[in-house]
Amino acid sequence: MKLLLSWLNDYVSISDIDPFDLAEKLTMATAEIEDVIKIERKLEHVVIGEVVSFKKILNKGCLSEVIVSNGEKAVRTVTHFNNLKRGDKIVLAMRGAVLNNGIYVQLKEIAGVESIGKICSAADLNLGPFDEEAIRLPSDSLAGTKVSDLINSIEYILEVDNKSLTHRPDLWGHYGFAREIAAILQRPLKNLETINLDKSIGLPSIPIKIKDHESCQVYCAVKLNKLNVEPSSLKIQSRLKALDQKAVNNLVDLSNYVMFEIGQPTHAFEGSKINGIIVRFLDSNKQFQTLDRLERNLVASDLVICDEANNTIALAGIMGGADSQISTTTNSILLESANFKGSLVRKTARRLSLHTEASKRFEKQLPSSLSELAIKRLLHLLSSENIGFEISSALSIEGSLEDQSRKIEVPMDFLHRRMGKQLQLSLVKKLLESIGFFVIEKENKIVVTVPPYRSQQDISIPEDILEEIARLYGYEKIQPVLPNTPMKTSYIDPVLNLERRVRSYLTERCGFMEVQTYNWFDDELLQSLEIRVTEGQVLLNPTSPKSSNLRSCLLPNLLGVVQKNIHYRSEGRIFEIGKVFNQDNEETVLTGLVYENLNEIDLEDFFRRKKGVVEECMDAIEQSHAFKVIDSKTTAEGIKTNRLLEIGSNDRKVGVMGIVPQTISSKIAPNTILVFCTLFLEKLVKPGLQKQLFHQISKYPDSWFDFSLIYTDQTPYERIASQLERFSDPLLQGYSFLYKYQGREIPGDKVCYTFRFKVAANDHTLSKEEIEQVHFRLQDHFRAEGIQMR
Amino acid sequence: MENLKLTFEKSISSITTMEELSKLKSTYLGKKGLLKEFQHKTSFDAMNPNEKRRYGKRFNDIKSHMAKSIAEKQKTLEDKNLIKTIDLTLPSIRNQKGRLHPISAIRIELEDICSSMGFMILNGKEVETDYNNFQSLNTPKDHPARDMQDTFWLSNGKLLRTQTSANQVQAMKQWGAPLRAVFLGKCFRYETMDTTHETTFYQMEGIVVDRNISIANVIAVMKEILSAVFHHNVEVRLRPGYFPFVEPAFELDIKCLICGGTGCKGCKNAGWLELLPCGLIHPVVLKNGGIDTEIYNGFAFGLGLTRLVMMRYQIPDIRYFNSGDYRFLQQF
């Protein structure tokens, strides 16, 4: 929202204050001022002019020759404004004027006519941007008056951050800010002058019916006759234009002016057409044309204003209807000022995407008492602007103008403890009174009466009073004090702790890059890779229709990452730790994905190394691990595969590991192998491995010998291992797999596996004979198992 | 014999190549070498048995000394040659290095700072209920503050949390008072994305519930945390803000770390940077969390973690974070 400093100066004297200082003070005590904008207007040699004659220049398109009186003499100008007539009051830039847009006014021949003046638009005077219409002034304006006597040549605008006003309907107008400034600067605030309506007592009332008082607490209306509708004064026009508003006519402009002054919107209906008001909810959906000539689809729950014949004439609190709009020839109006329930206005405005200056204010829930004030203020301004009118009805008020009076008790002790600082009672009182609160002292408490213009949402509990005192006192005057709290060790959520360990293990020890992807799938990618994921939770309002499905696994997004990176890197190791979502739950999982060019690697060796990463990772988080081959069609992480490794820990399935099938990988990166692994981290929170205790290191050396065994090439290692497991010997300490060999001396369909066996005793050094004995026993075992030795 | 030893020492010390060494070896120890020659020249007949024994011992000592010296010299020369064959200036070969996502890196830093101050590190859900994300935080269905956040809604009536504050009431219910906790994680807003707007970003929420928590405490704790975050004694200031779940609500600014408050491009000449919203927890929120407001009150703060990371590394575009782009991720 924008504030004009010259306007604020009407209520509190600030002409001696630096605008930037004022902005800073408001930011620190009231609401964030985002910007201070300086507007300069070049007004020298610019005066009010009166059109003496107007004629089109033949064959010159839109140009016209206008004789304008500048109060002293007639000046000939050529203009493109084409609807001027004798007697119109306009703004004339005379010879020597240099306007804001760079135009230098001098004697010039235009279209064969000598011109020595320029009729000005709002843009010429820098009143408002892009406003290229001729400025029109009221008929009683005096030709020759210097424009610099009417408006400021320098104007400052404060730009307020609207977010910081969400709870402060009182700040949605200049007067509210003036009240804050008066309090901050400790200067007097001028009262708002209003009209005295005594004379209208006894005039007929306008019948007003409110169907639901909760949705409309009060509705005020008054009828005016013999209204002289014409352009507003230059001061009113310039102020509204500086706030980016259009100038329409004196009535509409002043209605807006009051809204920007006290925050209460008012609306004028064509008076000749309306003799009564009904405020009600629509009972069925209907089309309604608003002032902006757009058809709006209203629904049954929308609050509307109807005339006495039940015709809808306005969308309550948002916009009037086109049919009841006042015309330029009107001289009779019905003026509305009402209080509508904020949440209703908000709901309808949101649904229609129709956010008007009025709806923005009503949404914040205005106080009822403002309704009457707005009418009285508007009538006062009509008079002070010398606009002729006659009041033809009583000020009719239906509902209650009384805002619930609020008294809040605040113990002084509470204030001190919450602020962390002692304040004198007299100071507290002074601060609160400066913004219109009424304070009574009572023992060790203050009883604060909240002024009606401060909304219920804003001020209702002692904490709210604390805020008023603290902000006006100045937060910067409160010295920092660390709290006293009991010493306790801190706690970290076990899943988060596990995440941290896995993250650091994979990045620091295994060279993995951590990535993060969105919480939803890219449906386009899923489609192109023919990945079918289980249906999970769906976003109602995705940013793109292709990203509405929350991810139920991480792999597809990681495949997308590889697809993006493959142009820069032909190999890589990535992982993500994140939430995945099923129908009604979410779970933290880890998925790692490693890819490499097939030409660069030995496939079996590559896979074994990745399996090693998984095992080491499980070791690092103190979990046991077991792999189980699934040799049937399965789906994991959204991809179909024929072979998969299931990872188990303590007899529970805790993850899967596999190779992305060629059908998918070839679309992402040709000739590339992608190995993935997913661990369900939440299943790995509890440590699954017992911490090893120290065991005595043998004083005697151990020995080893190697054995090579020959199998058919179809034999899985798993089976070989189980055959070896079946051999037990008191001297055998263990064995390890060394390598697999195919080639010379080994038949083509056979594979040779070499193992190393370690033997030792813990009470003596083994003799040559003892070692040989184990060797023989092992040979016997192999023979018994039917294993061919090399 | 002693002279022979001296000349040997002299010549061996000046030898630098293998060729010279083998020459020296044959000169002294060869079949026709100096030692043999010396032995031939010696007339043993003139010696008594004692002299003979002494002579023999001395001769063997010198001979083995020479052999040993030559062998040592040979090792030294070999070593020299070995090192000579390696070009020590070649570039190193490094292990492939992994990286934490920059958000994770700063996240760990923040959690460690808060943990060191006795804050619990708690976890939260990303899909939340309307109650946890809004209603429990004093933001009923028709509250104007809901306009400040555009929410992603799910077909099951739930939503993607718009703020980590969604955890406040849950944490209070689970852990009770007194409580010091932070919860850090992904938040979501329905936004049109550009360099500074993302649908997915990180926040860190912190709450302190205890007896007599004051505005003075808020300033002090925030100053303490932020000084640790920025590795610099930062100056903070509070000014009025508005969030329905705190009362009073503050916007916390820090004095610009670049210009120190005199005004620069980084702080748009303000001297201060708006950093985080905070405030004393609204009694309604405490009550929703089952806290006895007669005894306890508290404060809460919310730090935009993604923005902090952008500040820290001067990342100009927020969209990099979820891009998975290696060229981005390998920089941190």
Image (tube, rainbow, N blue to C red):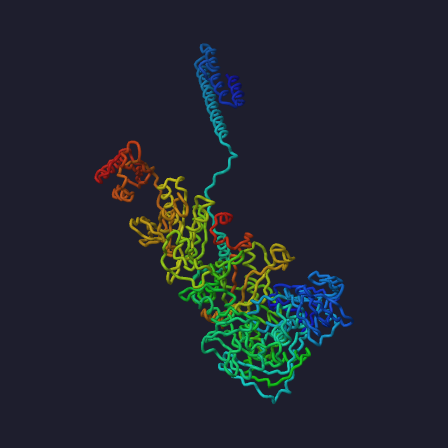
Q: Is residue A115 above or below residue A578?
A: below
**Residue furthest to the front:** A59
Question: Percent x, y for residue B250?
Answer: 56, 66
**Which of the pair A294/B42 is nearer the observer?**
A294
Q: Is residue A626 visible?
A: no
Question: Percent x, y for residue A504?
Answer: 45, 50
Residue A777 sits in quarter: top left
**Which of the pair A282/A681 is nearer the observer?**
A282
For residue A718, side relative to residue A419 (left or right): left
**Residue furthest to the right:** A72
Question: Percent x, y for residue A61?
Answer: 66, 64
**Which of the pair A172/A745 is nearer the observer?**
A172
For residue A21, side relative to residue B327 (left or right): right
Q: Is residue B132 visible?
A: yes
**Residue furthest to the left:** A784
Q: Is residue A271 above or below residue A489?
A: below
Q: Is residue A679 above or below residue A750?
A: below
Question: Percent x, y for residue A414?
Answer: 55, 73
Residue A80 sits in quarter: bottom right
Q: Is residue A316 above or below residue A615?
A: below
For residue A299, side relative to residue A702 (left or right): right
Total number of numbered labels?
A: 0
**Which of the pair A223/B192 is nearer the observer?**
A223
